[in-house]
Image (cartoon, helix red, strand yellow):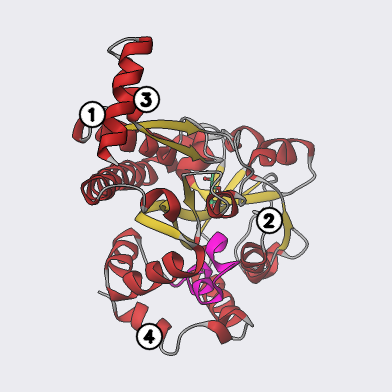
Amino acid sequence: RSLVRIASAAICTFAIGANSAFAADAVKLRISTPAVESDWHAKMLTVFKDELAKTAPGEFDIEIHLNASLFKQGTEPAAMQRGNLDMAMISAQDIAKQIPQWSVFTAGYLIRDPEHQKKVFNSDIGQKFYQMVADDMNIEILDVGYLGTRELNLANDKKITTPADLDGVKLRMPGSDAWLFLGNALGADATPLAFGEVYTGLQTGTIDGQDNPLPTVKAVKFYEVTKQIVLTDHLVDAIFLSMAKSTYDDLTAEQQKKVKDAAAVATAYNNKMRIEDEKSLIDFFKNEGLSIYAPDVAAFRTKVQNAYLESEFAKDWPEGIVEQINAVK
Ligand code: KDO
């Protein structure tokens, strides 16, 4: 293989100049995400790219496609599985469509905070669940990033305190069963819509609200078309920086290590920035004229946890997994 590489580099050098030799040999990595440029997980991809440029100069040619411009939200796992896409940031909800055990990580009020999230996925539990994704989906999870704690963000200013107050509220959720279940469990009428259509949906009134972490509410400017944020803290959300196994397995062991190390640097950057941002954003939204409500979180927690424990999803969870996750300190 290295002989072929040297030969192709030599031909390339001869044909189009010395500087192209590296580029011709570089592993192309196309990444697709619905994230907008100013959101931290989009910036995390740039950190990943910059880190590899330092640790493996000339070895990778990374293309980042934002705003779902390459693949629609939620179609990235299938694209990686078909060999049409190298990398994406996938959600537990995406994975749960193919691996039902993974729906445990779509449950509201289970993961307690970003630190708990990191510890769970770095533990044996995480390693076991990552292995399922490698075996059953042919996708290598490089690392977990904290997407943020999801809060309600509604177009009108009718005060929301308990799940009953959400009765009849058309709450946009991403389009999959796991997401819709969460929206309904909160007490709302969950309505599926792709991320890129949410701003207009709020503006035109086709939806009454949406849920996302506060840094995303800022990055996409949802505050321009909404009047309140309800601090339900209903899902400590994760995003998994992933690579098609077909791409990953073609890398040398050294490259695989560099890719994982770069993913760790990138997620650490994302997590730090996002956690800092979440602390300071309440004032930002207040200044933008939004009402910020502290609801009866215990009422939401009880309703949502019961809904999950009684759900069809829970039947697929590995025995004792909730207790094991709770026990991670
Ligand atoms: C969203 O559509 O609300 C969501 O937050 C779901 C996440 O899983 C993820 O796809 C995210 O959007 C996108 O990366 C855009 O920020």
* Residue type for callout 3: Ala
Give the CA distance from mark 2 to mark 1.
Answer: 39 Å
Q: Which mark is residue 175?
A: 2
For marks 4 and 2 on the same chain, the one whose residue lies earlier in the sequence: 2
**Residue 108 included in the magenta stretch of the image:** yes
Give the CA distance from mark 2 to mark 3.
Answer: 39 Å
For label 3, the residue is 24
Front position among marks 1 and 3: 3
Q: Could you say where residue 69 lies in the image, as x and y percent from the top left? A: 61, 33
Q: Is the residue marked by circle 2 packed among few (<14), some (14-19), or many (20+) residues within 10 Å? A: some
In the image, taking residue 287 as reference, residue 280 lies left or right, namely: left
For label 1, the residue is 57
* Residue type for callout 1: Pro
Q: Is mark 1 within 8 Å of ligand 1?
A: no
Give the CA distance from mark 4 to mark 2.
Answer: 29 Å
* Residue type for callout 2: Gly
Q: Residue drawn at (56%, 35%), measured in percent from left and top? A: 220
Residue 233 seen in the figure = no
